[in-house]
Image: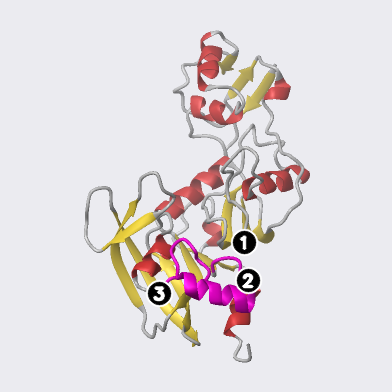
Amino acid sequence: MTEILINKTECGQRLDKFMIKYLGEFPMSYIYKAFRTNKIKLNGKKPKGSEKLNPGDSIKIFLETEKIKVKAQKLTKHFKIIYEDENILIVDKPIGMLTQKATKRDISLADEVLSYLDEKGELENLNGFKPAPSNRLDRNTSGLVLIGKNQVSSVALSQMLKEKSIVKSYLALVKGTILKSVTINAFHRKLPDKNEVQILDYRADGTKEIVTKITPLEQKEGVTLIEVQLITGKTHQIRAQLKELKHPIVGDYKYGDVNLNNYFKQKYNLTSQLLCSYKVKFENCTNILSYLEDRVFIAFVPAMFSKILDKDS
């Protein structure tokens, strides 16, 4: 028998949702059967699963305990830690790493984070909660990823990202010359059966409105370094939006200019798109993360940016 005492970082969620996360290797149908057969009890009683958890609640599980622990494979850490405290972890994801698995064989940032926290002994008192990235970056986009280390901080991060209380800024090197800052309203649509999106300047079926702010920082030899701020955040928003503006990202073979990409590949041995999630700012923090109000965190920008922009290169 395993007993879980709910603490303040786990309260407020439904029992069934909590148990689904805690018993990750068991199907949902098995968990509901365990409710019905008294193999999972809430405060000594048979639960329905819809109960909201409160601090001090007791959950008793009459199953094999070795099957209900968060398991973390031991992995080498490739990410850099930008900031860490008892509630959150901010890491710098390298180019070429998936944020989450695409297949069972993949090793992702999420896997490496679990391994790191497991080595520190920080998974032992989470009652089965599995820390995971709250935001995602494309495989070939480097930069900042936020992870809540407990249930409450994870929910807080997700809510703040949804409400745009965390401002995310990117650096990109793009084709052509951009001289003025611009804020662009457009419409975003995922293409069926493709890992690709379309940007339209009018509302249509299946579209969602997007807003992107672009600020030029530096120009050289027909390319411009820009800062991009996502007012909204949709799949491939930056990459597809810049393609639509005729200023595709250097090194982006999905949305970019093939000839330009080949030029930079040959001259600089460039192997990925030059897009980096380089800055986050915490604003309007009214939750467990209120102590981070107005804090700004900066990633390590890939050296290729400065190599290409170097006046002597």
Specify whether residue 208 is painted magenta.
no
Image-based side of 202 in relation to 92, left or right: left
Residue type beneath disc 2: Pro
Can residue 290 be seen here? The reply is yes
Q: Residue at horizontal 42%, vertical 54%?
A: 235
Instruction: Tell me the quarter of the image containing the N terminus.
Output: top right
Q: Which residues are magenta?
A: 248-273
Q: Which residue is mark 3?
A: 247
Mark 3 / mark 2, whichever is N-terminal: 3
Q: Secondary structure at mark 2?
A: loop
Badge 1 is on which residue?
A: 95
- Percent across and percent down for residue 68 are 67, 25
Distance in Å between CA atoms under marks 3 and 2: 20 Å
**In front here: 254 or 29?**
254
Q: Is residue 45 visible?
A: no
Image point 75% across, 46% down: which residue?
75
Is 263 magenta? The answer is yes
Q: Are marks 3 and 1 in contact (CB under 8 Å)?
A: no
Is there a contact, CB below 8 Å, between mark 2 and mark 1? yes
Q: Report which quarter residue 143 is drawn in.
A: bottom right
For the C terminus, which image quadrant? bottom right
- Residue type at numbered disc 3: His
Marks 3 and 1, how far apart in space? 22 Å
Q: Dividing the picture into quarters, in which one does residue 215 lie?
A: bottom left
Image depth: mark 3 or mark 1 in front:
3
Residue 30 placement: quadrant? top right
Q: Which residue is mark 2?
A: 302
Q: Residue furthest bottom?
A: 312
Residue 181 or residue 237, whichever sits in front: 237
